[in-house]
Every structure is written in C-alpha cells, then in structure tokens.
Image (cartoon, rainbow, N blue to C red):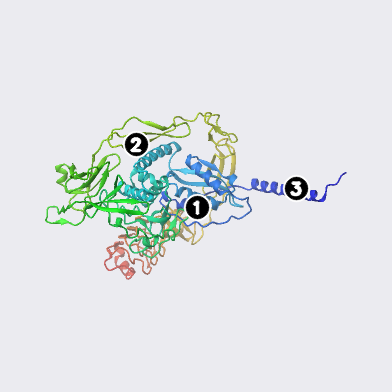
Amino acid sequence: MKCLPLHKKVFRMVCCLFLFSTLLFCKNMTAQALETAVSEENTGILQNGDFLKQRKPSESSGARPAGNTSGAKQAFQNALENIAPTVSLSAYNITVAELNHIVSEVVNNNPKYFYYVNCSYRYYPSNNQVVDVTFLYTESADAVRKKVGIYENAVKNILNTVDSSWSDLEKALYVNDYLATNCEYDTTYSKYSSYNVFVDKTAVCQGYALAYQELMNRLNIPCQVVSSEPLDHAWNLVKIGSSWYHVDVTWNDPLSDQLGQARHYYYMKSTSWFQGTAGGHISKDGQTQYVYSKDATDATASNKAYDSYFWNEINHSFGYYKGYWYANKGGTLYRYRLNHSGMTESSEYKKLNQNWPVWNGSGWWQGAYGGCVVYGKNLYYASPSSIQVLNLADSSAPAKTAFTPSADKLSQGYIYGFYIDIDGNLYYGIAKSPNEEAIVYSEKFHTHTYGAWTVTKQANCKESGQRKQFCSGCGKEKVEVIQPDGKHTLGKAATCTTPQTCTVCKTVIKKATGHLHKKTVTKAATFTKEGKKTVTCKDCGQVLENKKIAKIKCKKGQIYKVGNYKYKIVSNKTNGKGTVSFAGLTKNVKKVTVGDTVKIHGSKFKIVKIEDRALKNKTKVTSVTIGKNVTSIGKESFRGAKNLKNITIKSTKITKVGTKAFQNIHSKAKIKVPKSKLKKYKALMKNKGQKKTVKIC
C-alpha cells in the first residue's frame, strides 16, 4: 500500500475537521428552537406617530457566519414594495440588532411605505440570527394597492408642477410653499403619514416632514427627517449644493395662518440658528436631542448663509413665471431671480397700497393680507372685497377684477387669505378681522379641459402602468396610475414544500419554505392558572408546538400595565384580596379614572393608593377621578399637571396626602370630595402645593 506524503495527510485531516465542525454547526442550528419577537424599531417609526430613536450597533452573542446586511436590506425593501406578507432573511446571516437598523432606515427614509405598521421576526436565540420577517400592514394587500395608486397619482401631479429648469434651491422652496399652502395641521393629532398630507391634506409634524422628504426623494435632492422627543416635533434636513440646511414646513404653516400663507422663517437654516432663541427649536429645559433618519449630526448643517435672508419676512407663497419668482412682501409685490446659491436679482413689481378697514369702525388694520398666487401667466392678489389679477405676460396691463364674492358673503366680512389649487379651485376666507377665524368658501375658478389619455407605460399582471392628459386651457398635465391589468393566473395551490406561481409571469404568489403559515392559539397564563400555547401549520394542519405556559408570579412592587394605566402591586394576594397603587399612564390621556378595583392577569385587586409622582408633569391631563378604596395620595402625585382642572375624590378613607401633591396644577382647579369628609380633607390637603385659588369643595 502506497503512503501519502505528509503534507497531503495534513490537508486531508484539516478537511475532515472542517466538514465535521460544519455538520455539527448545522445540526445545532436545526435542533435549537426558533423564537418570535416584535422589532424594537417599531417604536421609532415616524408614520406611526413616534419619533426617531438613537441607534447604537450592538454585537450578537454566539458565533455566526459573516452577515450580508446590504442584501438583507434590499430583500426587506423589496418585500415592502410588493406588499408581501413575509420575507426570508436566513440566507443573509443578519442579527436582530442589524434587522432593527434595517427596519428604521428603510421605513423612516421611504415615506411611500405609509402602509407599514410593524413587523415580527423569528430568530435563533443562541446567536440572534434572524430567519424571517412577517409584516403587518394598515389594511389588506388589495386595499393597500388601491391606496398606493391614489398616493402615486397625488405625488406625480404635484411633481408635474415642478419646472425641470429650476435649481435644487428653487425646487425645495416650491415644495415648502406647496405643502404649507395645501395642507392643514391636524388638530386631532392622529394623522402622521405622507399619505395624510397628499390625500387627506391634513397631518401633524411627522406627516409634513415625511411628505417633504418624499417630494425631495422624487426630485433627487438629498433629504432626511429630524426629530426631537423633548420638543415633541419633527422636521427636515435638506442638502442644497454641498451644504445641509434645516427646513421646518410645519412651523412655516402656523395653526393661526390665513389661506395661502406660507412662511419662510424656518426655511434653509443652520443648526445653531434652529437651536438659538430665534429658531426656537429647543425645549424649555434646554434639551434638544436631535435625532436624524440617516447619518447626519448637529454639526452637519453648519452653513449660516440663509439664517438672516430676505425670505424671512415673506409670509405668503412664492409664485413662478418665466424665470422669476413673485412674492408679496409687506403689501408690495416683488419679483426675484434665484439660482442654486440664492437670490441674484430683486425688484419691486407693484406697490399694492391696500388697507383692510376695521369692520363697522374707523381706521385700518396694520399688516398685508393681499397674498400672492401665480396661476398660468397671471398673478392674483386679494383686496378686501375682490380677487385682482395682473397679466405677467404684459407688465403694462392694469390690474383687473378676477372674482368678487357675492353680496351676502361680503356682508359677513372682508377677504382674509386665498389660494388656488392645482385643480383650478379657488379657496378664500371671509372674516371681520385678521384675528378672527375666517369662513372658508370655494369656487371653481378654472375648469380644466383635458384631451385624450396618452399611455406612457403599459400595465401587466405584475406592474402598474401610467397615462397622461393635458388641459388645453392652461397646459396642466394630469397623471394617473394604471393598476395592473389583470390578476395573476394561479398555478397549483402552494403546499408546505411547493410554492404557488403565476403561470404567465412566473411570479411566486405564495412561498413554500416550510411551515411558514402558522396558526397560534394561546390561552394566556394568569396569576392563578397555567396557560397553553398551541402552534399548528395552517397549510397542512400539523401540530408544531404544544406548550404549557407557567403561572405568572405576582410580586410585591411589580408594575403592570392595564389599558392606559400602570399599577403597582402593594399586597400580592391573588384571591381577590390583593391591593395595588395607581402608578401612572402608559399613554397621554386627558381624563384619568382611578377606579375602585382593577383586574390584572385574572385576579381582582383593590386600588388603595395614588403612587408618588404618578401624574407628575402630565400636562395633557385635565380631570382625575379617584375611587372609593384609595387611602393615601403620594407626594408630588399631580405636581406639574398644569391643565388638571377637576379632581373628584369618591373615597372616604383617605388618611394621608403627600407633600407637593397638588403643586402647579391648574390655578382654578376644583377638588371635589365627599360632603361628609369636607372639613377633614381640607385640613389633610392643606399646604400640599396647590395655589390658594384651588377650591376644595
């Protein structure tokens, strides 16, 4: 028998050891159980009403192959784009921490994914390696696709009003003005997405910021979102040329504005200006904590070129016609020429010499209320009783009256604010003074006469198409998304091992990557009873897991969340004789009711105490009701709840009220107590921080 040379023997031994270790790793990976969790970045998603979170990379425990984060990010984004229910990431070897970064980066920098709510993932606990992700959307996939079509139509019709010859500075200016003019701040504080801005035309700061980012993305202008939890606010960072600047469209569209008003005070500013007294983007306690959606820092926007600029004093939108931007500055129409670096030309176009009389009185209101709207070749501005028009194609032509409200409308006041939207609708406000909320009326100012549709992109069963038409009167271009022209032709139904595909385009309709379609039935554990978790495959019915869930230990001092409230265990008896204290809120609410009892994990507890600092600095709380079992109110429990105006105490058992319990509540607050305890409670609550104007009755 011929012997192998020594170096070949060594090589063979190394290969055998490598093969053995690989097989052992694969065996361990197969044997260990998968766990499911919800991405922690779901709490930092702007369109869900949250604010950006500081993301610090964290290394996973356990050995794993090198991860392909860029490939995983692309797969994750492709799944979102296609509104897929799941995406497999096992081939990319990424950790949970890396997935959380991907979720935040993709969703917060792509406002078009307004339909994303959150996602859960499966992973191996030994090394935090992610296997797959399951998405939760606002609606069914078909309903989302319809909304995407509406969204795309709205966005593309806005972009069609942007002149391709404009510099990035001019495009960014136009978008600021368009959003400030055409969107209204949502006073219900429930609309956060770019969809709310473009379609519903109302949103809070997150929506404004995401809409601005969306339009900048489509115009290939670098843009990020900035948010600050201490400020409870979000805005943008935009790159013009080689420099970054802050743009706050929300604050450029103040709540008390008139129609057509678009400020520029918070447009193209440095970080130092924003964080200064003039910029006002710093909380009362001096904190800023700006967090950026990409890689910017506070030092990124250092250019101060526009901190004190001519547009700071212009409170109405700019209008464009043949190379010039027109604006109303203090009651005088100016025209400007801009390029990539700023203003290159400025001249007075027309002094309006207008005054708004005091209604049924003498004198005039100080201020300029004429506004400025350029529509086609015409510039429109308001007088107290009409909309005037100038022909920009003929600067020598005098102003003419374009529209006069009816006599009954003018009997209610003067015109304060107006604008004309891209569909040719005139909106104007009638009020008796600039300090009064105007009654808004609308008229069809220009009726578009569209020609035939021209298909610019054909739709198929997988991709949407596009068509355009033009108004013969004003040249406005209208764009519509053509939905996919037919449903997929389905092949054989998917099984646990075989995917279902479209027989036409071969697109995978339903993946088959094992028992992915699971049904989990969970009977929750309580303080007194075990729970049970049963997992079955929805495709084949196989039981994949049957697991008991241990009873929950009721620990003294443990805090539990029930609805909008938090409770702390005082006595951990679970037979209905236990007690808890009210420890605070899980979300901001106006009206707080501390009941007699609360049910926690199947057991009833008496609520016997208001915990120290339970509602401290909860400025949105306006009323509190305290149940009949409460015996003590902790120190500083309501301190700083400056809008707390009504406190109703039903308990006759209170023996202790902590120091500063009512400090800095509403100065005219009323504390209602049981009649039989009025004298005692007055003495008990004396000098607990409340002002003398607070009544105990």
* Neighbourhood count class around disc 2 (C-alpha, 10 Å): few under 14, some 14–19, many 20 upward: many
Q: Residue 664 bears which disc, if any?
A: none
Where residue 510 appears, as percent x and y from the top left, is 53, 35
Which is in the foreground here, disc 2 or disc 1?
2
Label 1 sits on a secondary structure element that is helix
| Residue named by callout 1 | 40
Residue 16's disc number:
3
Secondary structure at numbered mark 2: strand
Question: Which of disc 1 and disc 2 is earlier in sequence?
Answer: 1
In this orientation, which residue lies closer to the viewer: 559 or 131? 131
Residue 654 vertical position relative to residue 603 in the rendered view, above or below: below
Mark before the other along the chain sequence, 1 or 3: 3
Q: Which residue type does callout 2 highlight?
A: Lys
- Is residue 696 toward the left or the right of residue 146 in the image? left
Q: Secondary structure at mark 3?
A: helix
Residue occupying the point 65% across, 46% down: 31
Q: Are marks 2 and 1 in contact (CB under 8 Å)?
A: no
Q: Crowding at label 1, few (<14), some or many (≥20) Cα neighbours within 10 Å?
A: some
Query: Is 456 on the left or on the right of 540, as rendered?
Result: left
Q: Amino acid at mark 1?
A: Glu
Q: Nearer the viewer, mark 1 or mark 3?
A: 3
Give me the residue at 16% from left, 41% from top: 406
**Residue 432 appears at what percent x and percent y?**
17, 51
- Disc with the residue nearer the chain's start (3 vs 2): 3
Residue 81 drawn above or below residue 315: above
